[in-house]
Image (tube, helix red, strand yellow):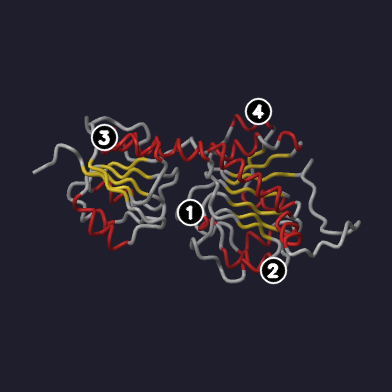
Amino acid sequence: MKSVIPKVLVTRKIPEAGLALLRNKCDLEIYQEDRAIPRQLLLEKIPQVEGLLCLLSESIDEELLSRAGHLKVVSNFAVGYDNIDIAAATRHGILVTNTPGVLTEATADMAWALLLAAARRLGEGDRIMRAQKFKGWGPLYLLGRDITGKTLGILGAGRIGRAVVERSVGWKMRILYYDNKVNSELESQFSAQKVTLDQLVSNADFISIHLPASRETHHLIDEKIIKQMKKSAILINTARGSIVDEKALVRALGEKWIAAAGLDVFENEPTLADGLSCLENVVLAPHIGSATIQTRDDMAKIAGANLLAVMEGKKPAYLVNPEVFVK
């Protein structure tokens, strides 16, 4: 018999700002370990729940969804939803929601943090200082790359791509962008130029990735594309690790096809491609693009509100597959 209070599973601790929305209105279960919920445990629990609030670390696929006899909604604690088989969820009549917009500014800040750190070799400098290897200032010591007046290439001119461009104004950069659609605002406000992928990677001094993960973007940045970049180019990725062929990037950095890279996402997280962590000319961050207190609180609120709306028979604010919703 259907319970009056819906049973909801949260696959990992998220900020209390989101959980507080659910505590008094749902029979709430939260996986307490500070790691991804084991797959087998998730498979065992899914048949009993009506709402699932999950993270990118969970694969919400046909195997899982076929066991979800009562599931109404999968609320993803993320903007991207490449961890969810949307077609399968739609076939099963399960709503999928996400948290767009809220992490735009934090992720754009992170892209610039990586760009600056890679250009000025801050990671190398930090390691030198901590190891007490600094012997004093020198005119040729730890020379980095200038940013002012250089060309910034944006792969994906959506919300985050635009926010990254906005932050470039103080550096008086020329803007190139690659996207399926024309972004008239970027062109009118920042004199951005829409170009092909080949044109962008051949001309940009800094390349920042802001594309979604998909079949079309998988390994978009491969050996062939990297070899078209300037030897002085710096590649930044705060989008999805699968967009870059990580093994090819390791070789490119090691053999100095390009100058440097700054990465917040990785192809097989949390595992890095062999040799990547040994390279000096790459700045590595542990997928913290949205990791600010305010942003994560806001993400939690949106994810909680999305789930609660479905439990109450309402249309959630951020619905990925709206064709499933029936009033």
Q: What element carries label 4?
A: helix
Task: Estimate the x, y position of residue 230 in percent, counting from the top left.
Answer: 74, 56
Q: Which of marks 2 and 3 is nearer the N terminus?
A: 3
- The residue carrying mark 2 is 254
Structural distance between the alpha carbons of marks 2 and 3 = 54 Å
Q: Earlier in the sequence, mark 2 or mark 4?
A: 4
- Which is in the foreground here, disc 1 or disc 3? 3
The extreme bottom residue here reads 274
Task: Estimate the x, y position of residue 91 in percent, counting from the top left.
Answer: 24, 48
In the rendered image of this protein, does residue 70 appear above or below residue 105?
Answer: below
- The residue carrying mark 4 is 188
Structural distance between the alpha carbons of marks 1 and 3 = 43 Å
- Which is in the foreground here, disc 1 or disc 2? 2
Tell me the quarter of the picture where residue 315 sits: top left
- The residue carrying mark 3 is 24
C-beta proximity under 8 Å, tags 2 and 4: no
- Which is in the foreground here, disc 4 or disc 3? 3
Task: Estimate the x, y position of residue 229 in percent, counting from the top left.
Answer: 70, 57
User: What amino acid is labelled 2 in the image?
Assistant: Gly
User: What amino acid is labelled 4 in the image?
Assistant: Ser
Q: How crowded is mark 2: few (under 14 residues within 10 Å), some or many (20 or more)?
A: some
User: What amino acid is labelled 3 in the image?
Assistant: Asn
User: What amino acid is labelled 1 in the image?
Assistant: Glu
C-beta proximity under 8 Å, tags 1 and 2: no
Q: Is mark 1 on a helix, strand or loop?
A: loop
Structural distance between the alpha carbons of marks 2 and 4 = 39 Å
Q: Earlier in the sequence, mark 1 or mark 2?
A: 1
Q: Earlier in the sequence, mark 1 or mark 3?
A: 3
In the picture, measured across the screen, residue 224 lies left or right of residue 298, that is right
C-beta proximity under 8 Å, tags 4 and 3: no
- The residue carrying mark 1 is 216
